[in-house]
Image (spheres, rainbow, N blue to C red):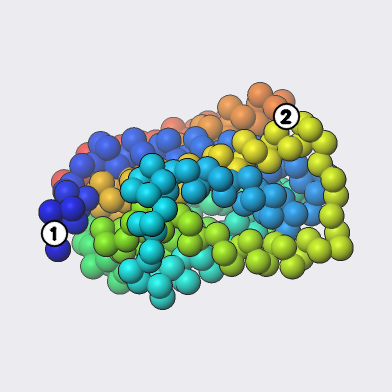
């Protein structure tokens, strides 16, 4: 592997963690926009318009990252897998946002770091040491505290969130798997085709015209949708998956702030306790040497 690959794979834990924290904020903004749009649109149309609004930003970022001519994929098979995972993650989570509270969706989604840690060995051959396992398990315990299993009524959308979370974990791991050899623009552009085609097919005959305010939400979600992929790619290029993954837990705090600001949601004491435990677990993973 050339100098470029060595540079990308040089361990930079703090930088990787920072990129994932930014990704968590950007992702929470997408969630808030989608939740606001779910009252007036079906999930496929939301996916379709969000992707169409994100496409100009994706192409712009690709141009800035090396030019559109540089996005030719080196491993097309992996890009097919990534596109399928992106579709599963997007449709599952967007559907759930229309059926479940924002905080509940985000909390269930916090299974992603644990799944990433579990899959990092077979996908990446990375060793997850004892101290990092302790931090990951503490963080996941915080998720359970915030969720309070058994207190919420069961809804099929919870399965959609879990399936979405698994797809997201594989998508994130694949960024680390092939990120050193693939152009950044290709890593983002080729996550779009499957979602776009499925959304277009399901939207035909069910179109609802957005208002100017709704178009604004779609454009914000589109810009953030383009940005979040780059943030995740940079995070997983910077350091090991077991270090980066727990930083996704910060999305709980962003969701709490956005939920209060736009819907007047006040998280329970258990949610705040869970968030504190999650952060502690993430810091243990970040600082652990083994």
Q: Earlier in the sequence, mark 2 or mark 1?
A: 1
Q: Which residue is mark 1?
A: 2
Q: Specify whether 4 is left or right of 221.
A: left
Residue drawn at 34 percent across, 35 percent down: 18
Q: Specify whether 193 is left or right of 13.
A: right
Visible residue check, residue 4: yes
Counting from the top left corner in percent of width and height, residue 43 is at 74, 55
Residue drawn at 69 percent across, 49 percent down: 49
**Where 209 falls versus 256 (above or below)?**
below
Residue 199's image quarter? Answer: bottom right
Counting from the top left corner in percent of width and height, residue 241 is at 30, 54
Residue 170's image quarter? Answer: bottom left
Counting from the top left corner in percent of width and height, residue 167 is at 51, 63
Residue 73's image quarter? Answer: bottom left
| Residue in front for this viewpoint, 255 or 7 | 7
Residue 263 has which mark? 2
């Amino acid at each position: 592997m050339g100098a470029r690959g060595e540079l990308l794979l040089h361990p930079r834990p703090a930088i990787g963690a920072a990129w994932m924290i930014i990704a968590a904020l950007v992702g929470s903004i997408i969630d808030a926009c989608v939740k606001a749009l779910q009252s007036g649109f079906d999930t496929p149309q939301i996916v379709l318009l969000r992707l169409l609004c994100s496409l100009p930003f994706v192409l712009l970022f690709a141009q800035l990252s090396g030019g559109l001519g540089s996005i030719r994929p080196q491993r097309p098979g992996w890009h097919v897998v990534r596109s399928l995972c992106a579709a599963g993650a997007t449709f599952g989570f967007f559907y759930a946002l229309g059926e479940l509270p924002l905080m509940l969706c985000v909390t269930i989604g916090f299974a992603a770091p644990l799944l990433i840690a579990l899959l990092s060995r077979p996908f990446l051959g990375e060793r997850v040491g004892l101290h990092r396992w302790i931090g990951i398990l503490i963080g996941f315990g915080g998720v359970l505290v915030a969720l309070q299993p058994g207190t919420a009524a069961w809804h099929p959308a919870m399965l959609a969130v879990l399936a979405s979370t698994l797809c997201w974990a594989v998508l994130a791991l694949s960024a680390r798997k092939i990120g050193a050899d693939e152009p950044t623009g290709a890593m983002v552009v080729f996550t779009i085709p499957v979602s776009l085609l499925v959304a277009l097919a399901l939207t035909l005959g069910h179109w609802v015209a957005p208002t100017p305010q709704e178009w604004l939400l779609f454009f914000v979600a589109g810009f953030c949708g383009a940005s979040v992929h780059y943030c995740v790619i940079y995070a997983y290029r910077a350091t090991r998956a077991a270090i980066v993954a727990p930083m996704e837990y910060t999305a709980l705090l962003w969701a709490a702030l956005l939920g209060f600001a736009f819907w007047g949601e006040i998280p329970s004491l258990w949610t705040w306790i869970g968030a504190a435990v999650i952060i502690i677990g993430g810091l243990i993973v970040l600082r652990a040497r083994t």
